[in-house]
Image: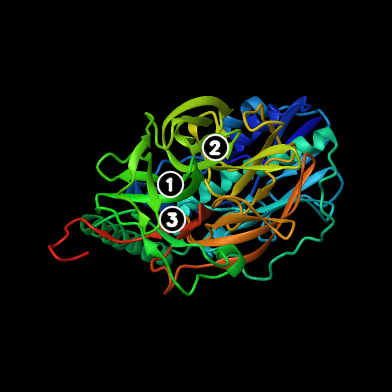
Amino acid sequence: MHVRVRLDGAAPRRWQITLLHRIAGTPGIRAVSVDAASVPDGWPDNLELLFRLEALIHGLQRIGSERLPPTALDPWRRPGATPDLVLDLCGDLPAGPAIWHLAYDGRLGDGALPASLLAGAAPRLTLMEAGRIVAEGRLGTDRPGILLAGMDDALARTVTLVAAALGRRVVGRGDALAAEPTPSSEPTRTLSGGELGIRAARMLAGAVIHRLYRLCYRAPHWRCGWRRLDGPDLIDLGRHPDSGWITLPDDGRRFYADPFPLAFAGSTHVFVEDFPHATGKAIISAVRFGPDGPEGTPVPVLEEPHHLSYPFVFERDGEAWMVPESSASGTVDLYRATRYPGGWVKEATLLSGVVASDATLLERDGRWWIFATVRDAAPDAPAGCGSYHDALCLWSAPDFRGPYTPHPANPVLIDPATARPAGRIVERGGRLIRPVQDCMQGYGRALGLARIDRLDPEGFAQTLIGRIEPGPAWAGNRLHTVNTGGGIECIDGSARAPRIRFPGRV
């Protein structure tokens, strides 16, 4: 297949070059070329100025949004050959077969993305061919409110979606959805000189406030809550229990997050991410729970040179196993306890070369599955690029030790509100319920409950059936995970941790 990409020839962007390389590396693509168009209404110059200001104030690196000289397209200029498919990033070609149009919130062309982000939206990206949707997703960002971060995250995920759709097209997968495009009737947002000044002033004020907050408080600071489970759990209730939660105390110099309780060998322990603010690198710790709650404070049980979190623990074959998040190492690793709750030794690397967040295992119908959100891979960004929260990928294996095979439809879902795992998947009435993190307004803002409607080697589908927010029963502005085990139910969320604690104050 020969793919031609129509783009702005006078002002190409780095993400477009990344996309061209990704298309060229797709099995079954024999040639890639560009149609360097003249686009009179490209990204405004004021937008470039705002990006420079944000990069300076927030210490950001320009990634996909960086403007490149027209010569960057020279390796891809191959006139004459007839393409099998045209990918129109400008939005000015008429609809027809073998022409894919890119649209953000119903507006054609990549120039519509700044308008969506300026309006404060999580852009809905669609690829359309002759009026039907080929692929779609909602694009997240790890730093809401910062236009440059939102732009680069959205562009990285655009590469993900387009490359995945082309891969399915090459192998003849019938994944297209029969749906009509839904153009927006709202006017396109622009960035006036006055608005640029207002945004710059707000950025400076926000940066000062953020700095002052960090001088007074340790941030981020998470906390774990627990309760004895003697009735319906959070998933069955669909709300916080009337009894509320008991906070697992910390010393203010560290926080605990991602609690996973496990009953094993006659005792119940809760495993947590243990994050000392002084080091900025988390380890895994555990605390034994007795009839009256935690017996002491969490003690370290696993440390690696890289950051560890989300200690997914389970029992199998009479052994205790753990799959902690180790996205900083680019792997997903399996550990076994030799002196429970400690003595963890690495038994296998389940996935490698992937920046995967919150890997969650599930055994279903004699097959094991890994659920995780994944950053987009880029040659100039070893740690990946794009959001950590919005692209759900699956892998499966005949045994929990592997070997794991990626799902052919990866990513099976792109949506910051329902993609990232938030704890163990549970069964209710023959249905699987998957806790998910709602990251639409930022990391771990709320907890969603998604019913898995399809899970097999050919497809995946889920339906969001509930959403639980922090509130009077769980103070703070985040609700992050939920897990049960050994008669204990645990959640976690945000808290304030003053840098200076006065005697007599908690």
Amino acid at dot 2: Arg
Q: In this view of the protein, which residue sits in the foreground, 60 or 201?
A: 60
Circles 3, 2 touching at the beta carbon (< 8 Å): no
- Labels 3 and 2: the sequence-earlier one: 2
Q: Give the crowd class for mark 2: few <14, some 14-19, many >=20 residues within 10 Å.
A: many
Q: What element carries label 2?
A: helix
Amino acid at dot 1: His
Q: State the residue at coordinates (48%, 36%).
A: 327
Q: What residue is pinned by disc 1?
A: 269
Q: How far across and how far down the image is residue 139, in percent?
A: 59, 53
- Labels 1 and 3: the sequence-earlier one: 3
Indicate whether 345 appears above or below 450.
above
Indicate whether 76 appears above or below 385.
above
Amino acid at dot 3: Ile
Q: State the residue at coordinates (61%, 33%).
A: 317
What colouring method underlies this structural image? rainbow
Q: What element carries label 1?
A: strand
Q: Which mark is residue 146?
A: 3
Q: In which quarter of the image is the N terminus?
A: top right
